[in-house]
Amino acid sequence: MSTEYEVKNRNLAPKGKLMIEWAEAHMPVLMKIRAVFQKEKPLKGIQIASCLHVTKETAVLVKTLKAGGAEVALCGSNPLSTQDEVAAALTYDKINVYAWRGETEKEYQRCIDKTLTYNPVILMDDGADLISTSHKKGIVKGITGASEETTTGITRLRSMEQEGALKYPIIAVNDAYTKYLFDNRFGTGQSTIDGIIRATSILLAGKNFVVCGYGWCGRGIAMRARGMGANVIVTEVNPIKALEAAMDGFTVMSIDRAAKVGDIFVTVTGDTSVIRKEHMLKMKDSAILANSGHFNVEISIPDLEAISKSKRTIRQNVQEYMLKDGRRLYLLAEGRLVNLVAAEGHPPEVMMMSFANQALSAEYLVKYGKELEPKIYKVPEEIDQKVATLALSAMGIQIDKLTEEQVRYLKSWELGTT
């Protein structure tokens, strides 16, 4: 079957090939899985529709699926996150790619629709746009199951599950230990700081850095901002997470109070209108607003437009909004994922674990998907453990094993103080 595609410029492929090679060199876990897939072909004859950020790391995943025998159709999960060089290179690897940076909302949806024309057996999603589209359009026949990559997507899918709307099983890759403990925390932490610095070139040391949300992504961003010398403030709606942030040594306050003192604001909640008009009107001149949540709704751009008298692009990925009183607010990456729009997304070393879960979950769905009910499932523990074991091996780390005596002790309720 011939490869179909719609990318910005296929002539960018040579550069994209080098980017993919760089990622492959830093994703040994996924490369080990690819070697097994190449030999065993567990995905032979399986059509996979995927809606993921089209980056060099994603390329390593889809090439691994291809090596396992799958036919893959790929679209971007964000209009601004596609690395055009990578998309171009994948067309030469016989991946059906529909993605380019700067898609309109209509083009974005059209690309999602296109991936569903390949009669997919398995869906891979990041944000649940692909899965929700398949349900809205009644394209569910023949789909064995799907996997979801991110927190926002799982939140949407849990809502579908509660309403009884799910038509096929979902594996929550985001909820695997080897995903959220590393990808969300270390990946988002580093890549968000990277995106802010690339976009602004400012010094973080000494700045009041406000992190809105203290989930695993928020933890990572707060940790890395503190490491850069920033004074980190956390805002939260969950009392347990707020308490944890306080005991981790961060200043915790309401967004209303933080608005008055913050120099940099980063939203990472998965919710909407976290920073609104009433907060913006209290901000300092030259405050910087960035988002690292999946959708561009956490910072209310309509509110920002309403209180501004003009705007201009002052740097790449930096829009200056001139408020009616003369103060300036700077919005990064159009309010979209700053780590993917202004930088390159997560480092390959963490994405190799997330995408190893994706690849092995696809294999699992091929084997057992038809036995599962239309519910959300955790990544099987044996897959999670396997990914961790492979990652430790790749890092040259050896760990201990329980002795037979220790195994017996842990299984016994009778042994205790002697």
Image: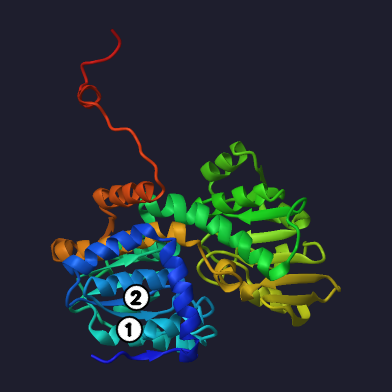
Locate residue 89, reporting x and y percent.
42, 82
Could you say which quadrant of the image residue 264 lies in?
bottom right
Estimate the spatial distance between the alpha carbons at disc 2 and disc 1, rounded to whole Å: 7 Å
Image point (66%, 47%), residue name? 226
Image point (71%, 77%), residue name? 319
Q: Are marks 2 and 1 in contact (CB under 8 Å)?
A: yes
**What residue did someone put label 2 on?**
50
Q: Residue furthest top?
A: 418
Locate residue 224, reporting x and y percent.
61, 51
Q: Tag 1, which secondary structure?
A: helix
Relative placement, left or right, of 343 versus 19 is: right
Could you say which quadrant of the image residue 261 lies in?
bottom right
For mark 1, does the 10 Å Cα neighbourhood hold few (<14), some (14 to 19), or many (20 or more) residues?
many
**Is residue 172 visible in the rendered structure shown here?**
no
Could you say which quadrant of the image residue 27 lies in?
bottom left
- Type of the residue with mark 1: Thr
Locate residue 318, reporting x and y percent.
70, 75
Image point (67%, 54%), residue name? 210
Locate residue 177, reporting x and y percent.
37, 49
Does 391 sit above or below residue 325? Answer: above
**What residue did someone put label 1 on?**
115
**Is residue 313 visible in the rendered structure shown here?**
yes
Image point (38%, 57%), residue name? 353
Instruction: Quarter of the image for the N terminus: give it.
Output: bottom left
Residue 161 is tagged as none
